[in-house]
Image (spheres, helix red, strand yellow):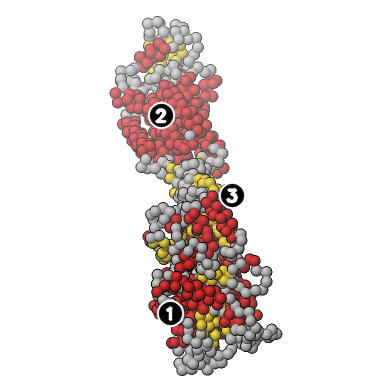
Amino acid sequence: MQMCGRPGSFFWALMILSSIPARVDGCDFAQSVCGAHAPGDVLIGIMLPCHRKVIALHERIRPESFHCADFYWESFLRSLAVIHEIEAVNAAGFLPGVRLGYLMCDTCSSASKALQSVGHMLDVNGSQNVMCDYNDYRPRVKIILGALYSEVSIAVAKLLNVYMVPLLSSTSSAPDLSNKLRYPVFMRTIPSDEHQTKALAKTMNHFGWNWVGVVYGDDEYGTEAFQSFLRDAEENRVCLAYQESVPHYLDHSLSMQRIKRVAKLIRSSNAQVVLLILKAELVEALFKEMIRTNTSRIWIASDAWSKSRSLAQMEGINKVGDILGFTFISKKSKSFDDYLKNLTATPGGYNHFIEEYKNLRFNCSSECFSNKPPSYCPNPDHLSMRSANACTSTDPQEQNDDYLVNALDTSEAFLHRVAVWATANALKELLKCNSSSCLGETNFPPWKLLRELKKVKFEFDNHSFSFDKNGDFASFYELIMWEQDGHHRQFQKIGRYHVLKKEIEVNVKNISWLSTANTTIPQSRCSEPCAPGSVKKILNVSCCYDCRLCVEGTFSDTWDLRTCKACPNGTWSLKGWAQCRPRAEIYLRWTDTHPIIMLAATAFGILLLFVTFIIFLVYRNSRPMKRAEVRLSCVMMAGLSVSFASVICFMGKPSVHLCRAHQLMYAMGFTLCVSCILVKAYRIFLAFLPFGQLANRRLYKLYKPTIIVIVITSLQGIICLLWLIFDSPNIDPTPPSPQSMSKLIQCSEGPTYIGFGIMLAYIALLALVGFLLAVKGRKVPQEFSETGYIIFSMLMYLFVWACFVPVYITNNEAASSVQASAILVSTYGIIFCHFLPKCYEALWGSKADTLERILRRWQVISSPKLDSVTEIDIDIPEMDTPSEKNNGSSITSTMAVLSSGTLSVFSPTESDLVITTPCNDKIHAYAMLGRRLRSVSI
């Protein structure tokens, strides 16, 4: 092992010395600064980092040489892909007669180092002269492929703008580089970060993560990507729990302090998702701190480290939690994998980076594994990549294996290979190449190649490629997840983001989360989501809120709405509803129980009236029917029938015409009925109440039954007409209660209810007058009058409608059914109190009553001594007297004058018959039946 150790030490020292640029005048600066070269007719510059950092860059105060450290395996692989593809173009004879060469310089992940390399690439004959016009400027490098980081590309592009040398990158994604006013020479085979940040925000929105932390580098790439993410996060309703920047250069003295501070902030925050817009080496330092403190989160990777193999294989990587990220198009190449297994410099050229790699991989340096390794030894991470066969050979440069193929993801270099073919296709147009030769001049000004590169369209590996107006490829991103693979991680594609469509596709079935140990998506929210039926009441930031229920008439049908939606016309919702529904219309439906009962009562009432009418017609000559005045009673029945019919108009969905019809029918029908009752009461009033001779004459003159009925009914008609004109019934416009899902459809009796009130008051007045007139004649024998029937029927009507008014006012929702019920009750009251007793008397009543018995009965209920004179109109039906038989009169009048000792009957007109009836108390009644003695009947 010691014998192998000494040659190993020599090789390490030789490797370090070879990386130090020569400072002797006349030396080949290009070779000292740029580590790989192959001659060719057209030279392509390759500007990628093979080392991660410049040693002590923050301490540099003099323009001395840059010293790099930490071999960058992934970027070294990308540079090999470019070299391999250049050799493939040459081998394929794509440019007949023209050979492509390259000059590769290590940027060491530093913009300053990259600018130094640009100076060597653009020299002409070993020098670079200042010119006023660079139209004919012809440096040996015609195009530069790179750089890896946007910060470096921005610095290099600004310099190349002077010379219009195209800069074609496959990894620099900063949005500002699409600005052709500032960077006209820059082009790239990837989309801009403007699309990547949209993809990141949409991914967070897709998984329901609205509370995230962001850590970004303080370079141009980090700050621009962060600003772009801020805009996209707001559009996708993603809020930032915190935002922290760290120095982009790992060797900075404050870097580790800042990383520890950021790690502490991440641990203390309740945000479970963290977006890292950082370089891979900064992410590695942060993850080490997370592993040390056993902190797990969901990490979202930017393209700078989304497929970093070194991170995926770092120790303890499974402890940090789930990792997702976006990457560009990737595809493996068998020829490239074979090339990596047999690494060698291009014939005629050199490649110090391959030499350095082989020294790291195959050099036998056992002293580097001791407790105190020499200063020239690489860091422990590189030592872990040492081949097990390192000490079996004396010359590491002769060794090869498949380590790069197995340890790194060779598909990541796909777009670097695409960049070479884009250049080759542009050169083919510029050099006017055909199948056998290229006619153009190979030493051309670089701006001509830039012009052709913008127009190029080509196919490579079953993909079509072209540049948009900003010099970018607009294709798609692949969403990957770092799945657990033993103690390490592997990359698994779980979705895709389409740049042009701005849509994300995620295959959720393929996702198994470490955070939840199953397929359940972990959550990262400031507040719990608001369920449908509620909306967010924002507190300090838009993602921190309280959930408030939607008020009546509004709804929210999805989660986490900010405002409630108004219900469409014809629908409504209650508080906290997730949808609107049509309000249930409430009215007296034909199929409901209550309307059916009222309809049955109406039908029975009309049937009862019809039967009563038949009985009245059949027994029209009987004593009860004659006293009830058949013709007048038939008019009453007609009025009651109309009242019953008005109840039918209360059923069904109300309309303007029905609202007016049922009120008008009731008003006119019941008024007609009550007017007839009033006529009957007035007749009794005239017949049996004491009045003087003068009063009798005047009252008798007013007794015109037909005229009275017509006038009283006509007055009600006028009231109804004025009501319809000035205060017409209509559909009730009162809106439903906001807390109700029922819409009451009923009639409104007018805006002011004045007409409705006058109509009812008029009927009530008629009923009250009839009631009072009947009360005045209450001592009259029932055989001569209908005072009891009138009193009870009118009393029932007044009672019913006195109860109706407060119920109608206080119970607006049942106004229609209340009024219909009141109509039925009052109508039945007249039928039962007025007509049915007459029918009973006509069918089963006693027929033995004679005038003698009637008068004797009247004497009993009268005062024993009557000093006054009473004028009486008595109907004496079916008297078996000559007067009846000869004249056929059914109704006559009798005048009786009662004194203290006798009852003398006289007549001021001619008489046909005088009846004298003696009594035990020597009181005589003289009944004088006159053919036309002030007849008080119809």
Q: Which residue is mark 3?
A: 540
* Measured Cα–Cα span from mark 1 to mark 3: 65 Å
Residue at 50% across / 12% down in the picture? 868
Q: First in sequence, mark 2 or 1: give its number.
A: 1
Which mark is in front, 2 or 3? 3
Determine the residue located farthest toward the left in the rendered image. 844
Q: Are marks 2 and 3 in contact (CB under 8 Å)?
A: no
Q: For mark 2, give the secondary structure.
A: helix
* Measured Cα–Cα span from mark 2 to mark 1: 128 Å
Residue 705 visible somewhere in the drawing: no
Residue 437 visible somewhere in the drawing: yes
Which kind of residue does numbered mark 3 sit on? Asn
Q: Which residue is mark 2?
A: 830
Residue at 54% across / 34% down in the picture? 758
User: Where 842 falls versus 749 (above or below)?
Assistant: above
Residue 485 location in percent, x, y? 39, 61
Which kind of residue does numbered mark 2 sit on? Ile
- Image quadrant for the N terminus? bottom left
- Image quadrant for the C terminus? top left
Which mark is in front, 1 or 3? 1
Residue 578 location in percent, x, y? 46, 49
* Crowding at mark 1 (Cα within 10 Å: few <14, some 14-19, many 20+): few
* Crowding at mark 2 (Cα within 10 Å: few <14, some 14-19, many 20+): many
Q: First in sequence, mark 1 or 3: give its number.
A: 1
**234 or 102, which is in the foreground?**
102
Report whether 656 appears left or right of 920.
right
Which mark is in front, 2 or 1? 1
Residue 134 is marked as none
Which kind of residue does numbered mark 1 sit on? Glu
Q: Which residue is mark 1?
A: 398
Residue 415 location in percent, x, y? 48, 75
Residue 300 location in percent, x, y? 49, 60
